[in-house]
Amino acid sequence: MSWLQALVLGLVQGLTEFLPISSSGHLRIVSELFFDSDAGASFTAVTQLGTELAVLIFFAKDIWRLLTTWFRGFADAEVRRTADYRIAWYVIIGTLPIGLLGLVFKDEIRTGARNLWLVSTTLVVFAVVLAVAERFGPQRRTVEQMTLRDGVVMGFAQAMALIPGVSRSGGTITAGLAIGLNRAAAARYSFLLAIPAVFASGIFSIPDVFERSGPGPQPSVAQMVVATAIAFAVGYATIAWLLNWVAKHSVYVFVWYRLALGLTVMGLLSAGVVNAT
């Protein structure tokens, strides 16, 4: 892997991880368009450690409160009746679908699921789904008003992001809007929900990304560290921007962007400008 590719992909990861436009899809598209090769699912998973570290720092107070409340709840019935205790459990339960499906379909995720026809199609299809959720979702409830059913629904929505082009935040924000959460609540919860799954995926992918016999360009340790650090810095700024944006605006800008990108990639594939695999 060249240093230019490592730097560009780290920047792309930081910019797109938290927006509902699919960071894995963007890394796949940018790799093919500008570097004529796929950096791979493992590279994506490891750079996501940087963006999730940004989540840990940005939401440190919330995460600490949820963790301490969860542990206290084992011994205190009064604590078990609080919203924080329920939310902590919802995050744990909501992580199970992506963990289980990720293990079962690990090989497909790293191979066939990275086909650019599939990526571009999911960009378009889930743009429409996001638009429908924005248009018809009640958008009245906060995170504190979530139920166990809501946690399960958003957990399965997150699992759909195993397919590049769907978007982890896009899937969970769409589901959140559909079940009645307001935009800010859906975005905030999507950040918290991603933490366990992304850290587990990134840590387990570290050996794979340095496997010299694997497909695609192999990064050096230094390149991987720098790309992840860039993803962290840019990702932190993106979190702040997105939370401010969704509090005041609709998500239609992301819908139109997804449609434009998906259709453009389809056009390039049809013209033979880029390869699907």
Image (cartoon, rainbow, N blue to C red):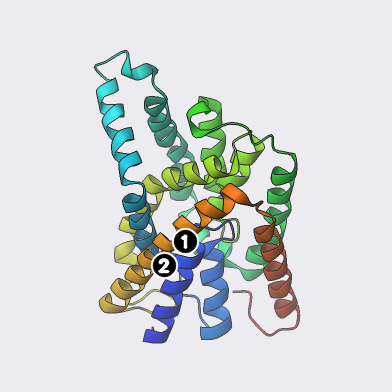
Residue shown at the point (45%, 79%) measured from the top left? 8
The answer to whether 110 appears left or right of 42 in the picture is right
Relative to residue 152, is residue 12 depicted above or below?
below
Relative to residue 147, is residue 225 depicted above or below?
below
Which residue is at the front of the view, 152 or 113? Answer: 152
Is disc 2 placed on a helix, strand or loop? helix
Query: How many residues crowd mark 1 within 10 Å: few (<14), some (14–19), many (20+)?
Result: many
Report which quarter residue 139 is drawn in: top right
Which residue is at the front of the view, 35 or 195? Answer: 195
Residue that mark 1 sits on: 238
Residue furthest to the top in view is 77
Residue that mark 2 sits on: 234
Report which quarter residue 6 is drawn in: bottom left
Residue 91 % position (x, y): 42, 36
Relative to residue 184, is residue 70 depicted above or below?
above
The answer to whether 95 appears left or right of 138 in the picture is left
Mark 1–mark 2 Cα distance, whole angstroms, equals 6 Å
Residue shown at the point (63%, 64%) measured from the top left? 119
Residue 128 % position (x, y): 74, 53
Residue 135 % position (x, y): 74, 44
Is disc 1 placed on a helix, strand or loop? helix
Residue shown at the point (51%, 70%) measured from the top left? 27
Q: Amino acid at mark 1?
A: Thr
Instruction: State whether residue 2 appears in this view.
Output: no
Relative to residue 216, is residue 62 depicted above or below?
above
Residue shown at the point (46%, 70%) measured from the top left? 40
